[in-house]
Image: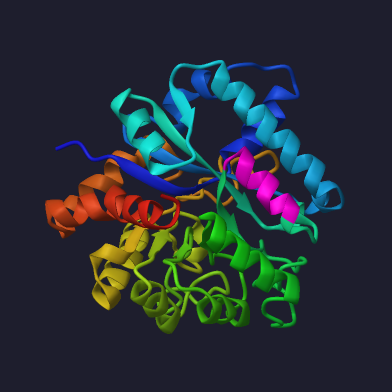
Amino acid sequence: MTYKIFDAHSDIPDYVYFQRIKGRTKVLETEFDNFFGEFVKVRVAAVWTRPEKRNMALQYALEMINQLYKDVGESTKFAIVKNTKEMENALKNNKIALWIGMEGGEPLQESLDLLEVFHTLGLRVLTLTWNLRNAIGDGCTERTNGGLTNFGIEVVGKAEELGILVDLSHINEQGFWDVLDMTKTPLIASHSNARALCDHVRNLRDEQIKAIAERDGVIGVTAYPPFIHKTKPTLKGMIDHIKYMVDLVGYKHVGLGFDFTEYLAGWEGANVLENFKNEQDIPQLVKILTENFTEKEVKAITFENFRRVFKKVVG
């Protein structure tokens, strides 16, 4: 049985951008085997504003999206998609479907018009904050726990109106509950694990996991080592997070958001899981999943759960 992977979080645009400004072309195509392999069929390509780029976040995000479009245009293997019909067409034509995401709302500055502009460019997943505070609210590593700002409330409302999926990874706890209080549509945490198994500020408490599930959302379990175990992160440990969440809220609310960092400039070789460091190791993950879950459950976790939420929210 061959399983498709829907990876809910990848910083691959960062790699494409830095490679292209060095003069490379067809970056995704030439790195296809390394970054996609036979399993990854759909991926959220997140535009991340690095901390050192915050003072030029809007320009940086626009340039990164532009370079991503250029790179995809040079290949026959990829399609940037804006709705689930386009995603399904890409899959039928044996292309990798890429959804544009934004990791941290810094590029929006304090303008709903910019949110609409990014939506026109293809933005369909908005991770409201990275670790730090921005105009939307406090990230999870801020000393304060201020939740959403007035502008943040407007952003979440406009995102829901436009059909942009709101991503609760990285936001602090007060902000998390603010979003739950003011929305009605399914929500996701694209790359977060269970705090009960690893007490890290980026992981979710049981009540947060339950709240996302009650909204018919999905949590993407991540391969980022510090979120798996404080001292001995392993692939088995990642599976333990999947099993824990499935036991807590059911298999329909658990997915995958790998957040592989091996290809990020400045992060090469750092914080990669020893026996699950990149896409080449996905077969090991799938094998273990099939040993612990039914075929129906594996299909849901690896692909169908995120497909369902995107269809409901994005259309």
The residue at the point 42 percent across, 84 percent down is 207
Magenta-colored stretch includes residue 114: yes
- In this rendered view, identify the residue nearer to me: 217 or 235: 217
Task: List the single residue furthest toward the right.
Answer: 55
Residue 246 place in picture, x, y as percent: 26, 69
- Magenta: main secondary structure equals helix
Q: Quadrant of the N terminus?
A: top left
The residue at the point 24 percent across, 74 percent down is 247
Residue 170 place in picture, x, y as percent: 60, 66
Residue 227 place in picture, x, y as percent: 50, 65
Magenta extent: 113-122
The residue at the point 46 percent across, 44 percent down is 277
Q: Is residue 83 left or right of residue 68?
A: left
Above or below for 192 versus 72? below
Quarter of the rendering containing residue 211: bottom left
Residue 267 place in picture, x, y as percent: 65, 45
Quarter of the rendering containing residue 279: top left
Tell me which colouring the rendered structure shows: rainbow
- In this rendered view, identify the residue nearer to me: 191 or 306: 306
Q: Can the viewer see residue 163? A: yes
